[in-house]
Image (cartoon, coloured by chain):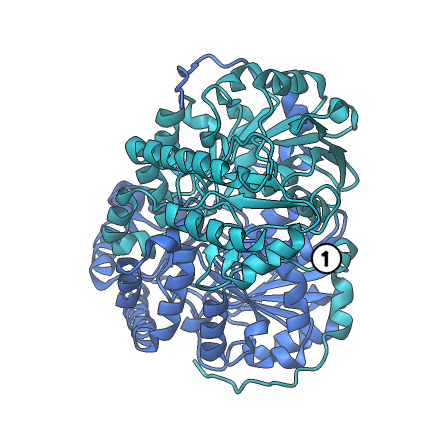
Chain colours: A cyan, B blue
Amino acid sequence: MSEPARDPSLPPAGLALRHLRRDISEMQGYTPGEQVRDCIKLNTNESAWAPSPRTREVLRQVADDQLRLYPDPLFKQLRAAASSRYGVAPEQVLAGNGSDDCLTIIYRAFLTPGERVAAPWPTYGLYDTLATLQGVDIAHVDYRIEAKQWHLPRHLSKQGAKVVLVANPNNPSATLTPIEQLRQLAYEIDGILVVDEAYIDFAPEGSSMLPHLASHPNVIVLRTFSKSYSLAGARLGLLFAHPELVNHLMKVKDSYNVNALTQALGVAALEDHDHHRALVQDTLRERTRLEGELATFGWTWPASAANFLLCEVGDKAGAIYTALKDRGVLVRWWDRPLLSSKLRITVGRPDQTELLLKHLKDLV
Amino acid sequence: MSEPARDPSLPPAGLALRHLRRDISEMQGYTPGEQVRDCIKLNTNESAWAPSPRTREVLRQVADDQLRLYPDPLFKQLRAAASSRYGVAPEQVLAGNGSDDCLTIIYRAFLTPGERVAAPWPTYGLYDTLATLQGVDIAHVDYRIEAKQWHLPRHLSKQGAKVVLVANPNNPSATLTPIEQLRQLAYEIDGILVVDEAYIDFAPEGSSMLPHLASHPNVIVLRTFSKSYSLAGARLGLLFAHPELVNHLMKVKDSYNVNALTQALGVAALEDHDHHRALVQDTLRERTRLEGELATFGWTWPASAANFLLCEVGDKAGAIYTALKDRGVLVRWWDRPLLSSKLRITVGRPDQTELLLKHLKDLV
C-alpha cells in the first residue's frame, strides 16, 4: 500500500457540493452530545452502573471466526432471546444498530418525501433530524402541561400524519403517558404509531405497549440497550411489530446491520435478568435520593418514570449548566422555548450525586 | 417486567400494511447470504485467515465504560489512524457500520426519488437494493467483455445519472479498471463518482483512486474491513472524500453509527501493518495456487485483482454449485443472465482449497 503525502491545501469542493440534495445541504450541521473527558457525565442518560458481567465473558470468548465472518443477518439467537424475554414471537422482533437505526428503518419504509409525521413536543430531537433526511414534514404538537404533569396533546391524532411518534416515558420530560391513551391514539390515527420505550424499564410495571401489540397491528414498539442494559457503547435496539410488518422492515435494513459482538452482548444481557433487575433498582433508589436532595433547592420536576429528572430551575438554568460544566459536571440544557429554564439531569452513581450536590450547593 | 404469554394466533396485519411505501411493499424479500453451519465457506469473500492478534488484545482490554457510554460520534481515534495509514486528512474520512452504511449515506445525501444512479453490470447487488429503497432508477450498463477481460462500458458517463458507482476491483468479476479510465469518468460525468475499493488491497500497487482524491472533488472512495482486514463480523467501512463533502455526509449518518468496540478494533487493525501485509500475501499466494489447480479442469476466469475468482464453468455450473453445497463446500452461483455459467469462488486457506479440489475432481 503506497502512502501518498497528505495535501494540506485541498482545493475547494466547489461544484461537487451542488449535487447534494437541497434538504441535506441546508440542514443544520450535526451537533454530537458533548464528550468532555474526565467529567461526571450526567447529560445523555446512560446507565450509571456497569453492564452484566456476562458481557465481559462474551468478549473474553470471542472466536476469530466471529470477527472474520459476516454476522447473522437475521440475528436468530438475539431474536430467540428477545422472544423468550418479552413473550413475543421471534418473527415480531427486528434488531437495529441502536434504536436510532430502527427509527431510520421506519422512516424509510413508510414515508415518501412530502408526507408528514407528528410527535408531541418537546421530545427526542432525532425525530426531527430523520424527517429532514427523509424529506418529510414534522408536526410538533405541544404537550399539555398542567400542575407540572405533561399530558398527551388531544390533537395529536388530527395532524394528517402517516407516522406518529411518542416517546414513553418521554425525553426530556421523563413523564409517562398512560397505556389507555396510547391505545386510544392507535385506534384514532390512520397510520402507524411508534411507541419509543427507551426508558420503559424505569417506569412502573404495566406501562409498556408490548403486551398490547397483538391488538394493534399499526403499532411499533422500540426498545434500547443504551439505558437500563448499560450497553450504549455497543449500539443495540429492538423493534417489535406484527410479523408481516417486520418482514417488510427487514428489507429496508442494511443486510448486516448488527455486528457479531453486539448480537452476542445482547443475548448475554437479555439472559441476565438478575443483573438487569438490580441495575434498575439501584437507579430507582438513587433517583429517589436525588429527588430528596434537589427538593431542598426548591426545584421541581414532573414525576419521573425514567433515569433522569427535568428540573425547573428558573432564569439561572443556563448559567448553572455552564458553571457545572466548568467544574467537570455535565448536565443537559437547551436554549430553546419551553426548555431554557430547565436542566435535565441523569441519575448517576451515589458518588457522582454527592459531587453534583456539592457543586450545586455552591452555585444555587 | 411482566412477561405476557406469547400469542401464536396473531390476527393478520391487514390495513397496517397499506401504510408502507409502495416501493418497499413490492420489493423482493431480502435474501441473506447462505449461512450453512460447519461448511467450508467460500461464498462471501471473507478473509480466510484470522484478523490481527491486536484485535484480541482490544477485546481483552475493553473497559466497562466503553460498553456503558455512547461511542465517539466523530470517531476521532479511528479518523486519526486512517489519516496516518492512508495519507489523507482526518477530515476526509467518515466511518460507517460497514461500507454498506457508507453507501446508504451516499444515496440519502445525493438522491431525490425519481433521480438516477448508474453502474457497470454485473456488479455488487446492493447498489440495486439501495436504489429501490431511495426510490431512484438504476441504469445497468453491461461491461464490455473481450478476450475474457471486463472493460468499463463506454456509455457509462452518458446515463444522466447523478451518482455513478464502480466497484474496483469489480465484484463478482474480480477485474480491475485502470485508474486513468476512472479519472476520465470522473471528469466526464456531471455528478458524483463512487469508487468502491472493497478488494483493492489484493490489486497491484497503484490501483487505488485514493491518491487522486485531491484532483477530483466529485469522487468518493470506499474501503471495507470485511476483506483484507478480516473483520467482516465487526462491521466497519471507511468513506474518503473532500472535507466539505464529508461535513455534509456526517449530517446524514446515524449519530452513533459505529459502536465503541468496532472503533477500537479498526484502530488496532490499521496500526498492525505487518499482519495486514502478511494476510494479503497469504491470500495472493493461495490465489496463485488455486488458479494453477483450477486450470487443470479447463476452467477459465478473468484475471483476478481480488480474493476470489469468477470461473467460467459452462452449463453444469448450477449443478456443481449444488453438489458442492451437498458436500459442505459453499461457493456462489447466480441463476441470472451473464452469470449462470459461472461460479464465484473465494480464496480459502490451503486446507480448504484441498477439500474444494478433492470434491471438484469427483464432480467435474
Looking at the image, residue A275 sits to the left or right of residue B311; the answer is: left
Is residue A280 visible to the viewer in this orientation of the structure?
Answer: yes
Determine crowd level at label 1: few under 14, some 14-19, many 20+ residues with C-alpha closer than 10 A: few
Quadrant position of the N terminus of chain A in the picture: bottom left
Residue A147, horizontal then vertical, whole percent:
68, 26
Residue A268, horizontal then vertical, whole percent:
30, 39
As drawn, A288 above or below A153: below
Determine the residue positioned at 77% across, 36% down: A115
Q: What amino acid does circle 1 point to?
A: Gln
Quadrant assignment, res B259:
bottom left
Task: Please tell me which residue lies in front, B181 or A255.
Answer: A255
Q: Secondary structure at mark 1?
A: loop
Determine the residue positioned at 27% across, 61% down: B56
Q: Chain of mark 1?
A: A
Looking at the image, residue A125 sits to the left or right of residue B33; the answer is: right
Label 1 belongs to which residue?
A: A28
Quadrant assignment, res A265:
top left
As drawn, A114 above or below A3: above
Task: Please tell me which residue lies in front, A326 or A114.
Answer: A326
Residue A238, horizontal then vertical, whole percent:
47, 36
Is residue B333 visible to the viewer in this orientation of the structure?
Answer: no
Determine the residue positioned at 52% across, 40% down: A308
Residue A81, horizontal then vertical, whole percent:
35, 31
Task: Please tell me which residue lies in front, A345 or B285.
Answer: A345
